[in-house]
């Protein structure tokens, strides 16, 4: 099983009100300069929120959620400090970035 850590917020907040592009650009540059593989993803409408264990998170961000997911808990905790108004949590999945847990759910 792989443990995935996430920071969750509304799409409007993360994409419009926060300098997320700058944060990702800095992080990608850091990874490239240290020859590290990217271990984080931006997932709109993450399907893992439909799991029963994720009800509290789904209730906190009921509409148009977006998640930054990583296998690196330190990065997610750093995001919480950097951005502030995000929920953080974790879940386990037996498949690497499986469609069941990380796929995009199309909104009507």
Image: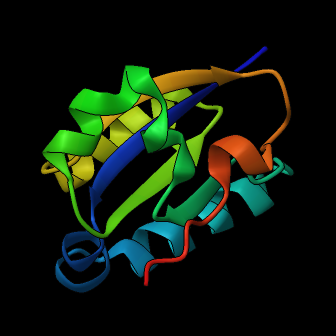
Judge left or right: residue 89 versus residue 86: right
Rendered location of residue 104, percent (x, y): 60, 66
Q: Quadrant of residue 76?
A: top left
Q: Residue furthest top?
A: 1
- Closest to the observer, 10 or 51: 51
Q: Quadrant of residue 56?
A: top left
Rendered location of residue 6, percent (x, y): 45, 39
Give the answer, above or below, for where 98 lies relative to 106: above
Q: Which residue is pictured at 45% across the width and 64% down the height? A: 45
Rendered location of residue 47, percent (x, y): 54, 50
- Closest to the observer, 66 or 83: 66
Q: Which residue is pictured at 65% across the width and 41% down the height? A: 101
Report the quarter where the C terminus lies: bottom left
Q: Residue furthest front?
A: 108
Here the colouring is rainbow
Report the quarter where the N terminus lies: top right
Rendered location of residue 70, percent (x, y): 60, 41
Q: How many marks?
A: 0
Give the answer, above or below, for where 86 lies relative to 14: above
- Closest to the observer, 87 or 19: 87
Q: Which residue is pictured at 30% across the width and 73% down the height? A: 11
Judge left or right: residue 59 versus residue 51: left
Q: Which residue is pictured at 37% across the width and 29% down the height? A: 54
């Amino acid at each position: 099983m792989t443990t995935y850590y996430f920071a969750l917020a509304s799409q409007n907040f993360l994409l419009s009100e926060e300098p997320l592009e700058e944060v990702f650009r800095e992080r990608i540059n850091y990874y490239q300069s240290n020859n590290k593989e990217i271990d984080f993803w931006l997932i709109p409408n993450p399907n893992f929120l439909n799991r029963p264990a994720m009800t509290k998170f789904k209730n906190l961000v009921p509409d148009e959620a977006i998640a930054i997911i990583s296998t690196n808990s330190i990065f997610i905790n750093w995001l919480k400090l950097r951005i502030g108004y995000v929920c953080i949590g974790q879940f386990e999945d037996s498949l690497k970035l499986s469609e069941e847990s990380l796929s995009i759910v199309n909104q009507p």
